[in-house]
């Protein structure tokens, strides 16, 4: 969908925001054995730390090779857009979830010598949520918002000509 570097940046920022916000709420709820209104502020504080890391990991690293892997399984323009989006989302989550679970374990869980088991537990707990959130909520929401933002910009640019 993004056609320029600026659009890639905006799309990446939107995707990162909604994924990180949901995952921080989810992990805060896991840590507190349930989510409550009081958990939103701590989740937002953690989000301020993890958002830049997630954006950098996704935008500069994973987004460089995940589409290449996904597009070996599906072909944009030939396969239905639903399958192209779903496969790309799955491949991205398969890389981003272990990476971000590692960072979250290092930063928030003070794992010490238990780094590997704590990271694996974090990854296993996060993966189903990350995948389902991406496929059914975040991905469609961000694509909708992105189309709205850049359709209006396109219409506004056309009116200036």
Image (spheres, rainbow, N blue to C red):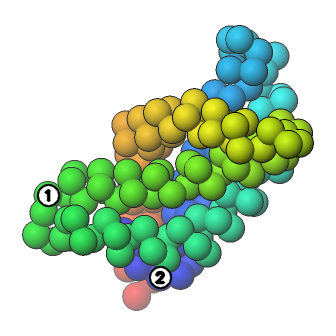
Q: Is residue 114 visible?
A: yes
Residue at 81 percent of width and 47 percent of height: 106
Tell me the residue that label 1 is attached to: 80
Q: Quadrant of residue 60?
A: bottom right
Q: Nearer the viewer, residue 97 or 147?
A: 97
Distance (Cα) linking label 2 and label 1: 23 Å
Residue corresponding to mark 2 = 4
Percent coordinates x, y for residue 61 in the rendering: 58, 73
Q: Horizontal and vertical percent for residue 85?
A: 30, 56
Q: Quadrant of the N terminus?
A: bottom left
Q: Position of residue 84 (x, y in %)?
A: 24, 59
Rendered view: 126 above or below 96: above
- Residue placed most toward the observer, 144 or 123: 123
Asked if 32 appears above or below 101 in the picture, the reply is: above
Disc marking residue 52: none
Taking the image as shown, residue 160 lies to the left or right of residue 56, namely left
Which quadrant, please, contains the C terminus? bottom left
Closer to the eye: label 2 or 1: 1
Q: Give the residue displayed 89% in from the left and 42% down from the top.
A: 112
Crowding around mark 2 (Cα neighbors within 10 Å: few <14, some 14 to 19, many 20+) is few
Q: Residue furthest left?
A: 78
């Amino acid at each position: 969908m993004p056609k320029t570097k600026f659009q890639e940046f905006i799309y990446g920022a939107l995707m990162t925001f909604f994924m990180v916000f949901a995952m921080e709420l989810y992990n805060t709820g896991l840590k507190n054995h349930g989510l409550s209104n009081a958990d939103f502020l701590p989740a937002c504080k953690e989000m301020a730390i993890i958002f830049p890391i997630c954006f950098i990991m996704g935008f500069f690293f994973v987004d460089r090779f995940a589409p290449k892997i996904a597009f070996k399984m599906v072909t944009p323009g030939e396969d239905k857009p639903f399958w192209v989006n779903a496969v790309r989302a799955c491949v991205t989550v398969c890389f981003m979830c272990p990476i971000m679970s590692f960072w979250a374990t290092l930063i928030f869980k003070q794992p010490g010598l238990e780094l590997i088991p704590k990271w694996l537990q974090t990854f296993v707990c996060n993966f189903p949520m990350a995948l389902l959130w991406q496929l059914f909520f975040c991905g469609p929401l961000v694509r909708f918002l992105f189309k709205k933002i850049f359709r209006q910009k396109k219409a506004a640019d056309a009116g200036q000509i």
